Image (cartoon, helix red, strand yellow):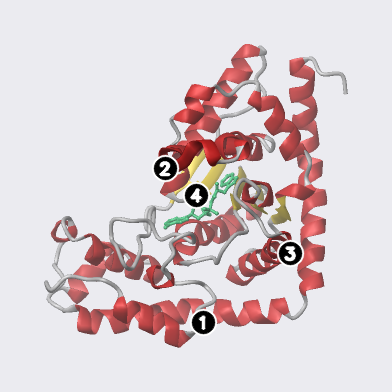
Amino acid sequence: MRVVSGIQPTGNLHLGNYLGAIKQWVAMQDSVTADGGDCLFFLADLHALTQPVVPAELANATIEMAATLIACGIDPDRAILFNQARVPAHSELAWILNGTARMGWLNRMTQWKDKAGKDGSSQSVGYFGYPVLQAADVLLYQASHVPVGEDQKQHLELARDIATKFNLDFGVDLFPLPAPLISEAAPRIMSLRDGTAKMSKSDPSDMSRINLIDSDDVIAQKCRKAKTDAEPLPDTVAGLAERPEARNLVTIYAALADRPVAAVLTEVAGQGFGSFKPALADLAIATLGPIRDRLSGLLDDRPAVGAALIDGAARASALAAPTLAAAQRAIGLQI
Ligand code: TYM
């Protein structure tokens, strides 16, 4: 197995990133590397360039986010942890795949359509081509599995289309089709202020998300103020169907507790949010508190985090080189 996934070093990591992606990464790192497979996790700093950047903030955010991943349990000795920009093969393969991807495919990406619908012509060219770089990220390592939240599924389907077309066009069997692995427990964690909108680092309201660096008091306050309805909690999953906020809070609780939603409901059925929210806050604090403490220790030695990224980039480059060379050969480039 070859597992590859990335995260953009912009804004704060939040509970959606943790439950939807990072928790799976940590679990896979343990099982996959024990079986002799590889796990590559990277900070997608090249993807961050598709939106306006403040250079000093990007550099800091890359180190801080790498430290956060380590605090969450990513072990840079077992997994390969690096920043994308330090492995130029990502950009080189992305350029080659720009010749394979079709404008129509990119035009159908919901992430693009959301932004383009508002003001497409002022977006960067890079933002339009973003999914091609993402395809290169995974195809470069011949990834078998890509653990992501549900919002990334469409991008991975595009990566499969690009891989298929490249293999066909050039008569090679170079790129295996990567399988998205979407967390069953937390495919899509929603905003605490609106159960129909995704929890997101770009939401202007900080109350909409629980950040991994929030203090215990802030976590408790965000849980207390989370939007809910007036009904008591139901005893079946079906009873949550028309209640997006209630469903989201129970999903978060179940994912944090590593228990099925149905099992949680049998315990909390009939309770109002007055008692459920403090229990949710306690669970979130019990999970995030130790991560925050480890993070603050790691940030005391930023050069050590930077050194781990340099080491990871060297290991990633070695894995990337044969695939990039094979793609260059297939397409007739003289390198
Ligand atoms: P990014 O940085 O937006 O998010 C990182 C990971 O967190 C997941 N996620 C969520 N999961 C559940 N609920 C949520 N509310 C939630 N919000 C975010 C995302 O699905 C993702 O798995 N384009 C990617 C980064 C990327 C990448 C890649 C991922 C670049 N190249 C190659 C996989 C493979 C992104 O912006 O993720």
Q: Quadrant of residue 140?
A: top right
Q: Is residue 38 left or right of residue 23?
A: right
Q: Amino acid at mark 2?
A: Lys
Which residue has dot 4 on it?
Answer: 148
Say if 309 sits above or below 157 in the image. below
Q: In the image, which is nearer the foreground, mark 4 or mark 2? A: 2
| Residue at the image point whose x is 61% and y is 45% from the top | 50
In the rendered image, which quarter is residue 323 located in? top right
Residue type at the position of mark 4: Val
Specify the farthest residue to the right: 335
* x 78%, y 51%: residue: 313
Question: Disc 1 designates what residue?
Answer: 289
Horizontal placement of 22 versus 294: left or right?
left
Confirm if mark 4 falls within 8 A of ligand 1. yes
Q: Rounded to the nearest whole Å, what is the CA distance between mark 4 and mark 3?
A: 28 Å
Question: Where is mark 3, residue-wise?
Answer: 56
